[in-house]
Amino acid sequence: MAGNSDREEKKLKVNARLDRLEAQVAILKDALKKAQVELADLHFGRRVSREQADDRDPEWF
């Protein structure tokens, strides 16, 4: 039964790592969206909302 315990422990560690990585991805997605809005501001010369930035030409992002 020790094998099952080791396996469960490894599974918990992997799941915890996955949770941390998913949180980091969410943070990076938000940072990317902010950078896209800033880039749209520079390109179009005005403030644009995140929704407007989503509708802009993707080559600028």
Image: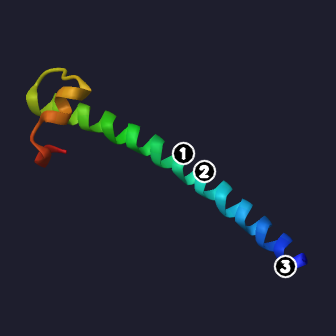
The residue that mark 3 highlights is 3
Mark 3 vs 2, N-terminal side = 3
Circle 1 Cα neighbour tier, 10 Å, few/some/many (<14 / 14–19 / ≥20): few
Q: Give the residue drawn at x 72%, y 61%.
A: 13
Disc 3 marks which amino acid?
Answer: Gly
Taking depth in this image into account, of 29 and 12 the one nearest to the observer is 12
The residue that mark 2 highlights is 20
The residue that mark 1 highlights is 23
Where residue 11 appears, as percent x and y from the top left, is 71, 65
Q: As drawn, is 16 to the left or to the right of 39?
A: right
Where residue 21 appears, as percent x and y from the top left, is 55, 53
Q: Give the residue drawn at x 46%, y 48%.
A: 25
Q: Give the residue drawn at x 65%, y 58%.
A: 15
Q: Are marks 3 and 2 in contact (CB under 8 Å)?
A: no
Disc 3 on helix, strand or loop? helix
Circle 2 Cα neighbour tier, 10 Å, few/some/many (<14 / 14–19 / ≥20): few
Disc 2 on helix, strand or loop? helix
Mark carried by residue 39 = none
Disc 2 marks which amino acid?
Answer: Arg
Disc 1 on helix, strand or loop? helix
Circle 3 Cα neighbour tier, 10 Å, few/some/many (<14 / 14–19 / ≥20): few
Q: As drawn, is 6 to the left or to the right of 14?
A: right
Alpha carbon of mark 3 to alpha carbon of mark 2: how far?
Answer: 26 Å
Taking depth in this image into account, of 51 and 35 the one nearest to the observer is 51
Where residue 1 appears, as percent x and y from the top left, is 90, 77
Q: Are marks 1 and 2 in contact (CB under 8 Å)?
A: yes
